[in-house]
């Protein structure tokens, strides 16, 4: 008798549990395009609870069939944490979400996924990349600072002093002499004492080159026509040098002579 009572209590408990589950569950007709995941989201249930309540061994369901769904028990997850060994196909089977949607929701460029990261399971978590607005650069107006006008000073043109030019250029025969020559007094015809110095001086024929003229002699330089000589006639000049030896070494040359004044 005691055993019968215990059995009746157990049966009653099971029956009440079944009635409670049935009372809280809702029959849902599967429509074309439905998945366990979309149904779980729609009815605020988890995929696992739907599978358990309907004795499903996979996520495969058929349009036209009826499923019992227990509302409000568990809210479906919006993200999935990727585990070692997972791939998009296995996650699709677990969640009932097509692989294409998983790729779309997560902006995946390939099937490669990394364990430990998360996948969005709804379009609500889809990352929205804000459109980059073109940056319009304002035209920069280059402002040139106004400074006090500076008067431009033109450099003064200085007239170059022309080099002395000769009024007469002559080809003449030149020899050399000294103040120590025999019969020489050391004082020139124009009164210049050349005994203690040797200025640049030449003896000329006054009829050709006036005494006191400034001249230039090729190989001798600028000199004064300050002396005369008995042998100095016509186009001939005699150049004053420091020593007799220097005069002998000079010999006779044909030179250009320019009268500078």
Image (cartoon, helix red, strand yellow):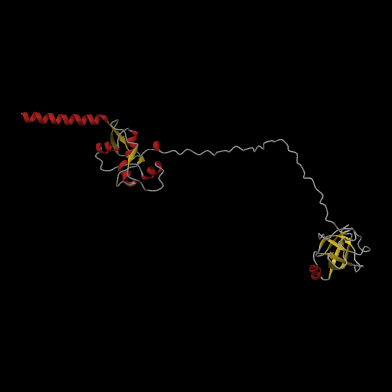
Q: Residue at 30% across / 36% down in the picture?
A: 46
Question: In which quadrant will I find the N terminus?
Answer: top left
Looking at the picture, tell me which residue is in the foreground, 61 or 121: 121
Q: Nearer the viewer, residue 19 or 232?
A: 232
Q: Position of residue 253 (x, y in %)?
A: 83, 70
Q: Quadrant of residue 120?
A: top left
Number of residue marks? 0
Residues 46 and 153: in front is 153
In this picture, residue 116 sits left or right of residue 225: left
Relative to 43, 154 lies left or right = right
Q: Which quadrant holds residue 196?
A: bottom right
x and y percentages locating residue 166 in the rendered image: 87, 59
Instruction: Name the outermost residue toward the right.
Output: 207
Question: Residue 261: which quarter of the image?
Answer: bottom right
Q: Nearer the viewer, residue 115 or 197?
A: 197
Q: Position of residue 254 (x, y in %)?
A: 84, 69
Image coordinates for residue 25, horizontal then vertical, percent: 27, 31
């Amino acid at each position: 008798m005691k055993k019968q009572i215990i059995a009746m209590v157990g049966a009653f408990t099971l029956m009440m549990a079944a009635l409670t589950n049935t009372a809280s569950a809702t029959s849902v007709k599967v429509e074309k395009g439905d998945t366990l995941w979309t149904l779980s989201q729609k009815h605020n249930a988890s995929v696992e609870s739907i599978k358990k309540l309907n004795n499903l061994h996979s996520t495969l369901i058929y349009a036209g069939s009826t499923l019992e769904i227990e509302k409000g028990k568990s809210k479906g997850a919006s993200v999935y944490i990727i585990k070692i060994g997972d791939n998009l196909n296995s996650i699709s089977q677990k969640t009932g979400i097509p692989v294409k949607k998983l790729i779309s929701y997560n902006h995946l460029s390939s099937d490669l996924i990394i364990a430990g990261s998360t996948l969005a399971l709804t379009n609500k978590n889809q990352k929205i990349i804000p459109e980059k607005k073109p940056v319009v650069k304002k035209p920069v107006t280059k402002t040139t600072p106004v400074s006090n006008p500076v008067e431009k000073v033109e450099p003064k043109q200085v007239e170059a002093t022309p080099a002395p030019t000769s009024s007469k250029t002559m080809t003449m025969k030149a020899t050399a002499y000294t103040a120590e020559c025999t019969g020489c007094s050391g004082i020139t015809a124009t009164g210049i004492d050349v005994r203690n110095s040797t200025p640049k001086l030449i003896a000329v024929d006054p009829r050709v080159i006036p005494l006191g003229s400034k001249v230039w002699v090729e190989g001798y330089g600028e000199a004064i026509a300050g002396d005369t000589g008995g042998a100095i006639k016509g186009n001939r000049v005699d150049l004053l040098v420091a020593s007799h030896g220097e005069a002998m070494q000079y010999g006779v040359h044909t030179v250009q002579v320019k009268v500078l004044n």
